């Protein structure tokens, strides 16, 4: 692996302008294609094979009018008045809605009797010609704009319902910009020069820009979740900066120790570059494992994020060597006053002294650090998962205001409609028994009422609209759904968004153990191949589980228990989004491996050179401590900035990722790793002979290789003469 990366980097450095030109052409081509043939994003929330999915397929086949997406135009009169007084304005507004594209029908609230008991709130059902998950944001937005006549008359007019909630466009947030500013500050402090700090940020922007274009193209070939670009950009920025940081930091370390620029670049690529390739591959594998959930929207997030991560790795291994070659000594320009520019011996750092202090008394440090992580993870034991509903969104969004009006006027369950779908071609209830079925369902204490049956044109399918008494994300609604399903005849199924998300949550809970097991098994095997050890991979997996558990616990404490919610700007408590545990595990396990691989590869490199376990751990931590800390601060800033996003799912992801990265880079990497490795001693690197023989070999430690270092192009700031061919090694110089 190190030989491949070294050769790849050397080829890029030998022809820097060709490499940069190829990247510029690639990015321009991707963005141009994305702008012309890129697809739209949509959320496929169905769980394949579930009852709700089968019911929706039946409706789409036999009764498309009932399967089409629907929204609710909700009107509210000022206090002391009724909507009847604004009837003319409402009629005008609904006529405007009927004229918008994709609208097939608009009900009259006064004829349908959908006016609240106090007369202050009314709603009109709007039916679209496509299912809500395939509709896109434009038709609901046009319908909302068409309600202007009612607003002009002094009424409150909002657009709610499933189609409005699913296709709502998030308010713009400055998360990326905030993360980049913090990253620039951290990099300037870490490198001491503005030029060196700008290099990782530039590479990350290239990777994310091309990756987002690629995701748009992907959306033309498959359903891609609306959350995929946001999550992919979040992770892409973090890993893009970190991967370039790892290589540039090693390059600068070698330069400041007296190694010529070109030799330093080859060695940095052979060592840190190899670690980047392995770490990035681990992230990609973890994200692609989301396909195992069988859920389309999660699979699309995994594929989209993997694409951006792959581009970040490719940029670090090809574009970065070309840029460093062209910069030469100019990478040290725009130095920040007071920052140390020279080479510092490993024994001069506080990291080295701290690592030896931990190694001297490993057990107390290990116990205390582990206890902290366990304490943070304890709230995760009471995690309640569900799917975010419109009531969790900010009140600045129209579907949230409509949600509140409907809840006040008609009860909280009105926002959680269910569709009882009867297939009259199958054995079970027939048309004559529908009244008795409706009576049985409405007798359930969790059901508010059952509406009049809707019959398909062929008369073979009937839909009974059913309204529960509780809100969509309320656990009581899931209980009601389970009771209703248990008593239904064999030819009746429950559909609707609430039923779909409940089935989705169930499938996620069922597949989580398989998902975690697959990622753990693959990651342990990969680490075993690279580090030729049994203890190191097992320890890495356990430590990652602890940091992920801590992140789970913090998310539960903040979002579910409400600890510090007001300080963080949350309007109330919400259940943890059901896709979050799976998504968290994939992202965090992959990202935590970045630091694990970067640190362990350096420790292994030092151990190979010295044979001293304690000293190799101290030197590895000393050499990587500042870089890992800087990388963690950047990741924390990038992820934490996404807490500004109005989406509760994105905010949970941002807080959880930021917490996990912070825990992983501090408590785990800087305390638990040296303490545990000190306790295990030489057992860290033990591998049975029979296993060593059957495992393939892949080195990321920069084993000695013969290299002919390419000359730096004349006049570009590097050495004026080519370096003589020689032997470069990955050990310390």
Image: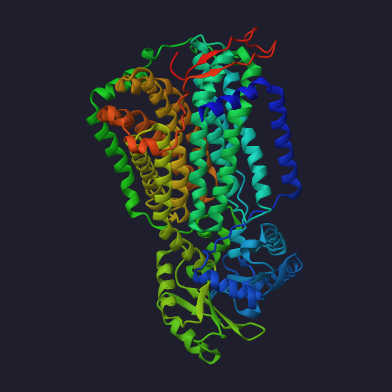
Residue 433 lies left or right of residue 226; in this view the side is left
Inspect this view and state whether residue 186 appears.
Answer: no
Q: In this view, does 397 lie above or below 703?
A: below
Residue 156 lies left or right of residue 294; in this view the side is right
Could you tell me residue 615's position as x and y percent?
32, 19
Could you tell me residue 108's position as x and y percent?
67, 76
Q: Name the colour scheme.
A: rainbow
Inspect this view and state whether residue 479 appears.
Answer: yes
Observer-nearest of 415 and 304:
304
Q: In this view, does 434 lie above or below 685?
A: below
Residue 627 lies left or right of residue 714; in this view the side is left
Q: Which residue lies furthest to the bottom in this view?
A: 432
Observer-nearest of 110 and 272:
272
Could you tell me residue 540's position as x and y percent?
36, 37
The residue that appears at 50% across and 13% down in the rendered structure is: 339
Q: Quadrant of residue 178?
A: top right
| Count of all numbered marks drawn on residues in the image | 0
Observer-nearest of 485 and 115:
485
The residue that appears at 29% across and 20% down in the rendered structure is: 356
Observer-nearest of 593 and 72:
593
* Quarter of the image where the C terminus is located: top left
The residue that appears at 50% across and 56% down in the rendered structure is: 392
The residue that appears at 54% across and 48% down in the rendered structure is: 302
Q: In which quarter of the image is residue 628?
A: top left
Could you tell me residue 485's position as x and y percent?
44, 76
């Amino acid at each position: 692996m190190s030989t491949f990366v070294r050769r790849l980097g050397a080829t890029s450095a030998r022809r820097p302008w060709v490499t940069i030109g190829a990247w510029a052409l690639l990015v321009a081509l991707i963005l141009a294609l994305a702008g012309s043939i890129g697809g739209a994003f949509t959320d496929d929330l169905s769980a394949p094979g579930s009852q709700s999915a089968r019911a929706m397929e039946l409706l789409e086949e036999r009764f498309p009018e009932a399967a089409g997406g629907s929204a609710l135009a909700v009107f509210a009169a000022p206090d002391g008045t009724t909507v009847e007084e604004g009837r003319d304005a409402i009629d005008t507004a609904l006529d405007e809605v009927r004229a918008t594209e994709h609208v097939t029908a608009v009900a009259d609230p006064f004829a349908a009797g959908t006016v609240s008991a106090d007369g202050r709130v009314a709603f009109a059902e709007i039916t679209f010609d496509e299912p809500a998950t395939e509709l896109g944001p434009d038709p609901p937005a046009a319908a909302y704009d068409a309600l202007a006549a009612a607003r002009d008359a002094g009424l409150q007019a909002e657009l709610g319902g499933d189609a409005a909630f699913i296709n709502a466009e998030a308010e713009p947030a400055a998360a990326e910009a905030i993360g980049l500013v913090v990253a620039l500050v951290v990099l300037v402090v870490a490198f001491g020069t503005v030029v060196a700090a700008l290099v990782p940020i530039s590479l990350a922007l290239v990777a994310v820009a091309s990756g987002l274009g690629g995701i748009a193209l992907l959306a033309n070939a498959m359903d891609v979740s609306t959350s995929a670009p946001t999550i992919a950009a979040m992770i892409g920025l973090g890993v893009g900066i970190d991967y370039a940081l790892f290589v540039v930091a090693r390059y600068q370390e070698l330069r400041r120790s007296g190694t010529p620029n070109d030799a330093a670049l080859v060695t940095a690529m052979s060592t840190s570059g190899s670690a980047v390739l392995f770490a990035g591959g681990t992230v990609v594998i973890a994200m692609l494992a989301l396909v195992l959930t069988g859920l389309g929207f999660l699979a699309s997030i995994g594929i989209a994020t993997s694409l951006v991560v792959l581009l970040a790795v490719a940029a670090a291994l090809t574009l970065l060597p070309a840029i460093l070659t062209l910069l030469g000594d100019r990478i040290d320009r725009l130095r920040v006053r007071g920052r140390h520019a020279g080479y510092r011996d490993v024994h001069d750092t506080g990291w080295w002294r701290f690592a030896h202090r931990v190694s001297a008394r490993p057990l107390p440090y290990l116990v205390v650090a582990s206890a902290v992580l366990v304490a943070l993870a304890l709230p995760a034991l009471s995690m309640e998962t569900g799917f975010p509903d419109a009531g969790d969104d900010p009140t600045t969004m129209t579907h949230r205001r409509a949600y509140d009006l409907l809840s006040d006027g008609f009860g909280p369950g009105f926002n959680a409609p269910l569709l009882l779908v009867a297939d009259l071609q199958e054995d079970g209830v027939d048309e004559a028994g529908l009244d008795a079925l409706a009576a049985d369902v409405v007798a359930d204490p969790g059901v508010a009422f059952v509406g009049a049956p809707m019959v398909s044109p062929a008369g073979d399918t009937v839909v009974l609209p059913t309204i529960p008494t509780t809100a969509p994300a309320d656990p009581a609604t899931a209980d009601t759904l389970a009771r209703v399903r248990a008593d239904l005849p064999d030819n009746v199924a429950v559909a609707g968004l609430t039923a779909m998300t409940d089935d989705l949550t169930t499938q996620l809970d069922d597949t989580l153990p398989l998902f975690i097991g697959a990622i753990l098994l693959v990651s342990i095997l990969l680490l075993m191949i690279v580090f030729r050890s049994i203890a190191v991979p097992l320890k890495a997996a356990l430590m990652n589980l602890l940091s992920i558990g801590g992140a789970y616990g913090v998310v539960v404490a903040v979002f579910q228990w409400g600890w510090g919610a007001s300080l963080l700007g949350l309007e109330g408590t919400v259940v943890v989004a059901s896709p979050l545990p799976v998504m968290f595990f994939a992202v965090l396990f992959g990202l935590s491996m970045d630091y694990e691989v970067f640190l362990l590869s350096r420790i292994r490199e030092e151990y190979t050179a010295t044979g001293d376990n304690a000293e190799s751990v101290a030197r590895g931590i000393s050499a990587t401590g500042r870089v890992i800390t800087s990388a963690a601060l950047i990741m924390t800033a990038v992820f934490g900035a996404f807490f500004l996003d109005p989406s509760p799912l994105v905010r949970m992801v941002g807080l959880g990722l930021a917490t996990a990265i912070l825990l992983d880079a501090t408590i785990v990497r800087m305390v638990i790793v040296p303490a545990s490795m000190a306790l295990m001693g030489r057992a860290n690197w033990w591998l049975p002979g029979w296993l060593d023989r059957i495992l393939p070999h892949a080195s990321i430690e920069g084993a000695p290789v013969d290299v002919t270092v390419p000359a730096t192009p004349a006049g570009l700031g590097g050495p004026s003469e080519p370096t003589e061919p020689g032997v470069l090694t990955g050990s310390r110089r």
